[in-house]
Amino acid sequence: MTVYDVCIIGGGASGLIAAISAKRARQDINILVIEKNDRVGKKLINTGNGRCNITNADISAEHYYSSVKAFFAFFDGFDLNDTRDFFESIGVLFKEEEKGKIYPYSLQASSVLDALRYECERLAVDIRCNERVERLEKSNDSFNIMTNLSSYTSSTVIIAAGGAASDKLGGCRDGYNFLKQYGHACTPLYPCITAVKTEFNLIKALKGIKTDVILTIKVGNSKKSDFGEILFTEYGLSGPPVLQLSQMLQGNGDNAQFSIDFMPEYDFENVVLMVKNRLNSVYEDKLENLFIGMLNKRIGQTIIKSAGFQLSDSASNLNEKEIRAIVSKIKKFQLKVTGVRGFEYAQVTGGGIELNRFNCETMQSTLCKGLFACGEVLDVTGDCGGFNLQWAWTSGYKAGFSAAKSIKR
Ligand SMILES: Cc1cc2nc3c(=O)[nH]c(=O)nc-3n(C[C@H](O)[C@H](O)[C@H](O)COP(=O)(O)OP(=O)(O)OC[C@H]3O[C@@H](n4cnc5c(N)ncnc54)[C@H](O)[C@@H]3O)c2cc1C
């Protein structure tokens, strides 16, 4: 039986970079990656709508969430420039788009995965797919790793098993359980970067409509806004700004409300003027036609109804106060949040294994020698925009490098 130096549980983003950095750090060691899916990187290949938003030009603490205040120290030692150099070394060039989002120049997630896989192959990393690690035991100075098919021995183990989000692509709770077994605490987990459920009656007629808005979420006393395309669905709202702001909800909709600005390019008084001009021009007298050519027809009608009017009401009878009430609905359409969609629809898991029992330079557990962790299993969650993959690259690279360097031979 081969005895491995480094065994990596999980062949996703953080596990693959960990394998490469370990082998580059020490060519004389044996590395094993165990992946339960039929191939590695199943989630990675689906990132960024198949384009892989690999990182972001603005990697800063304000885009991340963790229960440990000093968590950003864990990003030291492998920053954006190191990430760019690493990917260039395996042939992947970067391309920056809006909001600092960085993609592979090919705009194909599959090319990122291919490059990682080929480098693993070149370095003779042993990859076993279709094997799920079921038990992890420590005896003296090594670990026994039991899968559904076999068992292995390794001097060090890196838990790169990801989080609970998106089970179809490999999401599960195994990584948390392995780490808990060695005394690590886990914060409450919640679905993050996910669609949001809202009260439905108000927006029933809007199902299927996509529109550019400024979306603001208010949770208790905190507020955050984002611009982009939202989609009205049978459960509430989806689309990039919704996924982005879902982070604020931490898994539940208590005391939360959306406010939608349907005409973000115009301020309130501009819209009032626009509506008044319309009332003085050629339109038929029914309110239902007031917004033709200005707003999506169904959105316009929903606004009229939510302002307390009938579609058949006469437009020419509106007074100043009523016009302003209608414009308020265009600029500040309020929708009560009732919850978020579950882990199966989420892109990442909020919360995770607490960082305070890991060394921020090496990613090694301070509770169990030889045990390392990286990626989503840990309590670091990023905004939408390449931030979660950057955490996988940084923590994975450091874990692989340090595990390799810790081998005494
Ligand atoms: C649809 C979607 C789109 C996304 N788009 C982006 C994006 O564009 N940019 C971005 O920054 N982030 C994005 N993310 C988030 C990002 O993909 C993850 O944060 C990142 O992949 C986490 O890396 P990881 O290595 O920790 O976990 P994963 O990539 O999930 O890898 C963990 C691996 O471990 C395996 N595993 C788990 N348990 C076991 C076990 N017991 N035995 C063997 N193997 C096991 C799993 O099958 C999985 O392959 C997206 C996520 C999803 C779902």
Image (tube, rainbow, N blue to C red):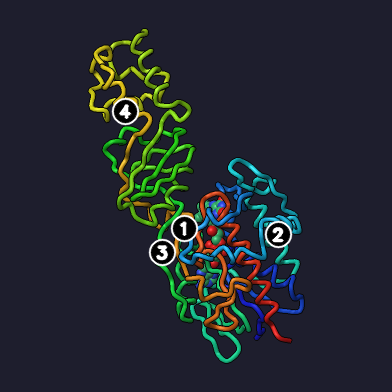
Whether the residues at callouts 4 and 2 have beta carbons within 8 Å, the answer is no
Label 3 belongs to which residue?
A: 189
Q: Which residue is mark 4?
A: 303
Which is more N-terminal, label 3 or label 1? 1
Residue 46 in view of the camera: no
Q: Secondary structure at mark 1?
A: loop
User: Would you name the residue on which mark 2 appears?
Assistant: 82
Q: Residues within 10 Å of mark 2 (few under 14, many from 20)?
A: some
The CA span between labels 2 and 1 is 29 Å
Badge 1 amino acid: Ser
Mark 3 lies on a secondary structure that is loop
Query: Decide: marks 2, 1 in contact (CB < 8 A)?
Result: no
Q: Residue at x 49, y 80 (%)?
A: 135
Looking at the image, which is closer to me, 186 or 115? 186
Of badges 4 and 1, nearer the viewer stands 4
> Who is closer to the viewer here, 88 or 172?
88
Taking the view exactly as shown, the residue that stands out farthest to the bottom is: 140
- Residues packed near mark 1 inside 10 Å, few (<14), some (14 to 19) or many (20 plus): some
Instruction: Give how far apart the Cα atoms at labels 4 and 2 are.
Output: 50 Å
The image quarter containing residue 224 is top left
